[in-house]
Image: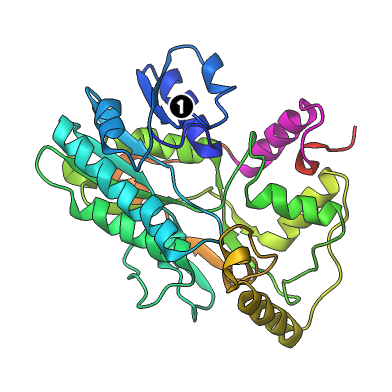
Amino acid sequence: MTGASGFLGGHLVDGALRAGHQVRALVRPTSDLTRLRTVPGLELAFGDLGDGDSLRRAVDGVDVVQHSAARVVDFGGRARFTAENVEGTARLLAAARSAGSGRFVFISSPSALMGPADGDRLGIDETIPYPERWLNLYSETKAAAEQLVLAANGPGFTTLALRPRGIWGPRDHAGFLPRLVGRMVAGRLPDLSGGRPVLVSLCHCDNAVAATLLASTAPAERVGGRPYFVTDREQTDLWAFLGRLAGLFGGTPPTRRLPPPILNALVAAVELLWRVPALADHREPPLSRYSMALLTRSATYSTAAAERDFGYRPVTDQESGLRGLLDWARSIDGGPAFARPPH
């Protein structure tokens, strides 16, 4: 599997090992491997998605490839996103097929369907098409990679894509939730809800792992060449959820609101400034059309197809997930703001 040194990938490693699988993880020598080196039974294969030889060695003898590594940030040029998200996926696909792997599970995202003019979308399913234009380079290259994976499906080589939305849970130090909570604790996040509920689907890491393991062994004739949304059971009011997290981690829910014209002007100004290569290539913007869409558009997804085709059921509910998140955060000494709840 790829992405093992990251948040979701680390949980995928643990879940596959608990299920009794032998696991080999492709890792860069420069990645933080402190935790992975302590995981009993995990085999590390050193390499990179840009190095075809290392990929061929990594997939040799592997039955199922789970590919979660990706460039997920909101900055950087087209060439870099294409190299990491599209060309790297194509290279891994080719290596897996040549090595005789029987299955390729791609961890995609609903962001692959995000266009610049989308509004609220509630209860959508996999029949929704890709947009003609994408909201940002991450969305565009994630869609391109997903299409490559699904098109590669064939006899003896089953490929599919999972689209977990808003993955959250313990051991997340740099994802969307810890960053938002950190800003709330510091008093730097205004309420962008516009005074209305922003309804979203989220996906606890346990649920993403459960779906990935089930999809890795489901009958090929059911899942081959198909994408699947994967979410928690709950439909969440995003800003109410963020406010609750702020309270749990020692902050206060945001109350300051920005009128939409001012907010739109700020986003336009930041995106204009971020056309400067020195910024665009190295730093994430404080605001962007993509981040605003995630925070202001309602977006919920049906998991009926995943339930039908491979028996997906959420294994962790939101309340249990929050308790686990707090327990993990309290166990960390000197962690980030997200990981320092009141005692």
Q: Is residue 328 magenta?
A: yes
Frontmost residue, 23 versus 287 = 287
Residue 278 picture location, percent across and down: 61, 64
Q: Residues within 10 Å of mark 1 (few under 14, many from 20)?
A: many
Total labels drawn: 1
Frontmost residue, 144 versus 166 = 144
Report whether residue 341 is seen.
yes
Residue 42 picture location, percent across and down: 43, 17
| Furthest-bottom residue in this view | 261
The N terminus - image quarter: top left
Q: For the residue labelled by badge 1, is the local secondary structure a helix, a strand or a loop?
A: helix
Report whether residue 219 is seen.
no
Res. 45 image quadrant: top left
Residue 69 picture location, percent across and down: 43, 42
Figure check: 233 above or below 341:
below
Horizontal side, residue 250 vs residue 174: left or right: right
Figure check: 71 above or below 195:
above
Res. 284 image quadrant: bottom right
For the record, the magenta segment spans 317-336
Horizontal side, residue 323 vs residue 184: left or right: left
Frontmost residue, 328 versus 90 = 90
| Furthest-top residue in this view | 40
The C terminus - image quarter: top right
Q: Which residue is mark 1?
A: 13
Q: Is residue 248 magenta?
A: no
Residue 103 picture location, percent across and down: 23, 36
Figure check: 114 above or below 336:
below
**Which residue is at 67% across, 75% downward?**
270
Q: Amino acid at mark 1?
A: Val
**Which residue is at 37% across, 23% downward?**
24
**Which residue is at 53% across, 37% downward?**
6
Give the colour scheme shown.
Answer: rainbow
